[in-house]
Image (cartoon, rainbow, N blue to C red):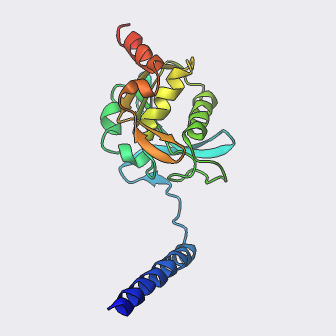
Amino acid sequence: MLNDVIFGLLGFVVMSAAIVPLSLLVEAMRPVPPTPVRLSWAPDTPIRYVSANGVRLRYIKTGEGPALVLLHTLRTQLDLFEKVVPDLAKSFTVYAVDYPGHGYSDIPPAKYDAAYFVETIEDFLQALDLHEVTLAGVSIGASISLIIAARNNPRVSRVVAINPTITRRGAGWRAAPLSRVSSSPWRICQSSATQ
């Protein structure tokens, strides 16, 4: 009986150890998908690129009105917003951007933490010379928006933060209450909403 358990555990360890290199090998052999020239969900919206924080970022711009920058979650891309961009573009100039290492933006060797994404998005706003921007983000995108607002970035006038998440030393934790992030973004949202 004990031998069966030992051999079972040994087999499990060997199989587990083999899965990682096998997975890496399969991933290395997989062809790189071609970069799309248009969005399947918005074929008339041109795909654009801009250099921000030393990285080539893919983004879109569509619609007319005040600037609205959409910031996606981790492990997704600007296409996350495909269902809402057409309606938002009726009232806003909508920008949606792929973070570094996401979608079809460059994949630089970097520390992919909140600070890195904040710096990149701040540089994105500067590179496009955007002003009076509303940042709207989901999860880490919400946290990026709140952090940028807390820094009193003069380009940002409003924030829409949906389910903000803050990463602390590699472990994710939910920003509840909002005061864990900062009280400054909340005051910025309140003052913008009353103008």
Left or right relative to 50: residue 2? left
The residue nearer to you, when weighing 89 against 144, is: 144
Vertical side of 67 occupied by 37: above or below = below
Quadrant including the N terminus? bottom left
Left or right relative to 171: residue 2? left
Q: Residue at x 35, y 36 (%)?
A: 163
The residue nearer to you, when weighing 37 against 76, is: 76
Residue 37 placement (x, y as % from top left): 50, 54
Q: Residue at x 44, y 18 (%)?
A: 183
Residue 70: tell me if it is visible: no
Q: Residue at x 53, y 59 (%)?
A: 35
Residue 146 placement (x, y as % from top left): 46, 27
Quick one: which residue is furthest to the top in this view? 195
Vertical side of 121 occupied by 9: above or below = below
Left or right relative to 168: residue 111? right
Vertical side of 55 occupied by 126: above or below = above
Asked which quadrant contains residue 40, the reply is bottom left
Quadrant including the C terminus? top left
Query: How many marks do you count on the picture?
Result: 0
Vertical side of 100 occupied by 17: above or below = below
The residue nearer to you, when weighing 171 against 193, is: 171
Q: Residue at x 33, y 29 (%)?
A: 90
Residue 83 placement (x, y as % from top left): 30, 43
Asked which quadrant contains residue 63, the reply is top left
Quick one: which residue is furthest to the front in this view? 2
Residue 3: tell me if it is visible: yes
